[in-house]
Amino acid sequence: MTDRLIIACPACNTLNRAPRERLAAGKCGSCGAPLFEGHPVALDGRTFEAHAGKSDIPLLVDFWAPWCGPCKAMAPQFERAAQRLEPSVRLAKVNTDQEPDLAARYRIQGIPTVVLIQHGREIARHSGVMDAGRIESWVRQSLN
Ligand code: ZN
């Protein structure tokens, strides 16, 4: 029996069922986009739930803002972490200036803050800059 996971498409947010062992090569049944491209996906109040609550893989959200220097410093590291952690984890970014409701819901006090979510439940969070290696090891530890 094949183990199928529900994965939200990063392009159109449609929920797909994909075999676990072929996730990395999976394509969206609705829009045809690759399900994983090694890039964080930008989420807003409309698209957040598909990835945070409905997908079967954990979601790592980087809460950031354009005026935040440390956030800018961490951005390329978060990008590299996406290449290392996909397809076991989806990486996403939420602009707290544009999405104050999401920032309030997760009680974001300072940025950058990363929050690890599985099936809609927060399982870990970390505030402050991390490099790609630290992000990866922190996520893997938190999921154990
Ligand atoms: Zn799609």
Image (tube, rainbow, N blue to C red):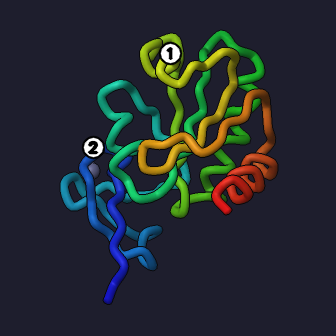
| x, y percent for residue 40 | 53, 42
Up-down: is 64 above or below 123? above
| x, y percent for residue 101 | 42, 15
Mark 1 residue element: helix
| x, y percent for residue 108 | 60, 19
Instruction: Describe residue 79's horizontal placement relative to residue 58 as left or right.
Output: right
Q: Which mark is residue 12?
A: 2
Up-down: is 27 above or below 78? below
* Pair 1/2: label in front: 1
Q: Identify the residue at the far bottom of this view.
A: 1
Q: How many numbered circles does the render carry?
A: 2
Residue 40 visible to an observer of this rendering: no
Query: Residue 32 is drawn in which quadrant?
Result: bottom left
Dot 2 alpha-carbon crowd within 10 angstroms: few under 14, some 14 to 19, many 20 or more:
few
Instruction: Describe residue 19's horizontal placement relative to residue 78 as left or right.
Output: left
Query: Residue 111 is drawn in which quadrant?
Result: top right
Q: Residue at x 66, y 15 (%)?
A: 109
Q: Does any atom of ligand 1 lie closer than 8 Å to the CB of label 2?
A: yes
Dot 1 alpha-carbon crowd within 10 angstroms: few under 14, some 14 to 19, many 20 or more:
few
Q: Residue at x 80, y 48 (%)?
A: 134
| x, y percent for residue 88 | 54, 63
Q: Amino acid at mark 1?
A: Ala
Instruction: Describe residue 143's horizontal placement relative to residue 50 as left or right.
Output: right
Q: Circle 1 sits on which residue? A: 104
